[in-house]
Amino acid sequence: MLSELEGLPQKEVANRLGISLSGAKSRVQRGRGNLRQRLLDCCDIETGRSGIIGYAPRDKNRDGSSCG
């Protein structure tokens, strides 16, 4: 959240959390991956050259559970 939503550089994230820079980078990448998977599970996403160009929420996750 610090990196993606607040726009902090990963070095500042590391300083704020009291962890190494490589640890902060790993956490940011893992968080991005988790967010991506959650979005893909709950939405049909259409991408183009400029990124996401459309989406449609699903009523259920791919595994049949609720998306709420």
Image (tube, grey):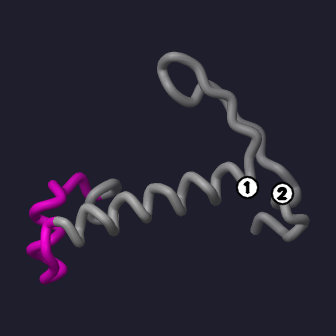
- Does 23 appear above or below 5? below
Amino acid type, mark 2: Arg
* Local secondary structure at mark 2: loop
Left or right? Give the position of 59 relative to 49: right
Mark 1 / mark 2, whichever is N-terminal: 1
Q: Which residues are magenta?
A: 6-21
Left or right? Give the position of 19 relative to 54: left
Circle 2 is placed at which residue position? 62
Near-viewer residue (29 or 39): 29
Q: Quadrant of residue 5?
A: bottom left
Circle 1 is placed at which residue position? 41
The N terminus lies in which quarter of the figure? bottom left
Badge 1 vs badge 2, beta-carbon distance below 8 Å: yes
The C terminus lies in which quarter of the figure? bottom right
Image coordinates for residue 67, horizontal then vertical, percent: 78, 64
Near-viewer residue (37 or 16): 37
Q: Residue furthest top?
A: 49
Q: Which class describes the residues within 10 Å of circle 2: few (<14), some (14-19), or many (20+)?
A: few
Q: Which class describes the residues within 10 Å of circle 1: few (<14), some (14-19), or many (20+)?
A: some
Let me know if residue 10 is in the magenta part. Answer: yes
Q: Residue at x 25, y 61 (%)?
A: 25
Image coordinates for residue 54, horizontal then vertical, percent: 67, 29
Image coordinates for residue 29, horizontal then vertical, percent: 37, 58
Let me know if residue 39 is in the magenta part. Answer: no
